[in-house]
Each structure stands twice: as structure tokens, then as C-alpha cells.
Amino acid sequence: MRVATARGVTTLTLDSPHNRNALSTALMTELLAGIAAAVADDAVRVVVLDHTGPVFCSGADLKETAAAYASGSVPAGMLGDVLVAVRECPKPVLAKVAGPARAGGLGLIAAADLAVCAQEATFAFTEVRIGVIPAVISATVLPRLHPRAAAELYLTGDTFEGGRAAEVGLVTAAVPAAELDAAVAGYCASLVRGAPGALAGTKELLRRPPATDLRAEIADLSARSTGYFLSAEGREGVAAFRERRDAAWVPTD
């Protein structure tokens, strides 16, 4: 995996084109380390998941999986750790998908906060066609997909393109391949303008389960809102808005 950081954005590039960026133990270990390093670095504000080669991610490394059968443990068991790390990263994670994604790769895309794909990119939940089920990835995929689409795509294993991926909620946007870099750069430019603490807090809000007690929910959210307004970031943000300047956390180089 390759790692590069510029203007508050760390790009983690899946770099195993020989096996179509399959989720091998080695690649998942590197990805976990890359996310942990990005979380620990205060200069990093956004994480982008990119890829080398024509394929974003082909899913589980089936060659490694076949070799591991004798041990009774397969690499797919580690995928849950990766999905949790991406989903719970306190910094926004954006998946940049220029090419095909299959099976576990779709779980990775769904775990990201935002995902932008080329319209030409293709996707498929191929698990049923090799005798397994899309179990682990359902934790991140099913909250994104419309229920009818989930049933169709999970059960048929059929291939679909970028436009359909956006339509059913798997990705945020599908753009022409020539515009993919610009679309990702645009999202990153917007994300780095958010305060680090506020971005992390907003991600927590997005993960909250539906309220069962509205009054208690409103009371909790009101307390959170007041806390953020009174925080150092909140005070700086209000001052910057009133003074018509960038807030202190906006990267300058």
C-alpha cells in the first residue's frame, strides 16, 4: 500500500495490482496500519482510499483463502476489523473508485463516509456465485442500500455500473472517468474546512441509532450543541465567520 499526505489529506492507495487489489492478510494489515497512523496524525484531516491498476478491489484473496483451508481460518475473518476501522475513523473517509469492485471491496466502499466512482466502474456482490454469503460486509452495506435493491443485487450477483451504484446508495456520486480526480479534490477541499472535532462529532451523529424517546434525544442533542458552541473550535469558528476569514484549522499549505 502507498501512503501520501498533502494539505491535510492522507491518501491510502491499495497497491496490489497483481491480484486486483484483493483483500489479502498483508493488504488488510497495511490498511489498518495506515488508518491508525492517519488517526494519530493531527495534521491529517481527511483519508482517501485510492487504488493502483484498473481494479479498485476484487474482494477476498481467494488464492490465499484456498491455501488457508487446512488451518480452519480464512483471511476474510480479518475484514471485519478493516470495516470497523474505516467506519469508526474520526476523520472523514472518502473512497475513490476508478474501476471494478467486487464482494468485500463493496464493504470497504460502503464503510467510507463518501464514495465517488467513475460511471464506467462496475460492481457486483458475487458471494452467492462461489457458495458463500455477503455476511461481514452487510454491516456497512445494508445501511446504505435500498432494501429492494439489496435483495436483487445480493441474490443475483449481477454486475451493475456506477450510475446504479449511486442510485441505490452504494456510492455518493458517479461521474465520468475524466472528472473523477476533480470530484474527489472538490470533496476534499470542502471536508478540510470543517473543524476536526466537529467532523468527528458529526460522524458520531450519523452513526446514532433511531431515537426511541424523542424528549431524551432532544435533551442530549441540545447539550451536545451547547458544548460545541462553547468549545475552543466553536468559538474560533464563530469568530472566523464574523470576521470573514478562514478558521485556524483550515490548511494553508
Image: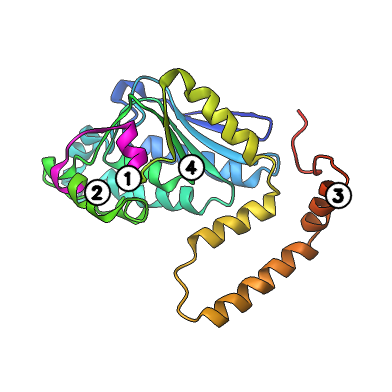
Work out whether 79 lies above or below 188: below
Asked if residue 83 is among those painted magenta in the image, a careful observer would answer no
| Residue 105 seen in the figure | no
Residue located 21% across and 44% down the image: 153
Q: Are marks 2 and 1 in contact (CB under 8 Å)?
A: yes
Residue 234 location, x and y as percent?
Answer: 78, 57
Residue 149 is labelled as 2
Q: In the image, which is nearer the foreground, mark 4 or mark 3?
A: 3
Residue located 20% across and 47% down the image: 154
Of label 2 and label 4, which has the lower sequence position?
4
Q: Main secondary structure of the magenta part?
A: helix
Q: Quadrant of residue 174?
A: top left
- Tag 1 secondary structure: helix
Q: Is residue 176 left or right of residue 182?
A: left
Residue 41 location, x and y as percent?
Answer: 66, 42
- Tag 4 secondary structure: strand
Of label 4 and label 3, which has the lower sequence position?
4
As measured in the structure, the alpha-carbon distance from the residue carrying label 1 to the one carrying label 3 is 40 Å
Magenta span of residues: 154-167
Give the residue at mark 4.
Answer: 114
Give, as a three-letter code, the residue at label 4.
Leu
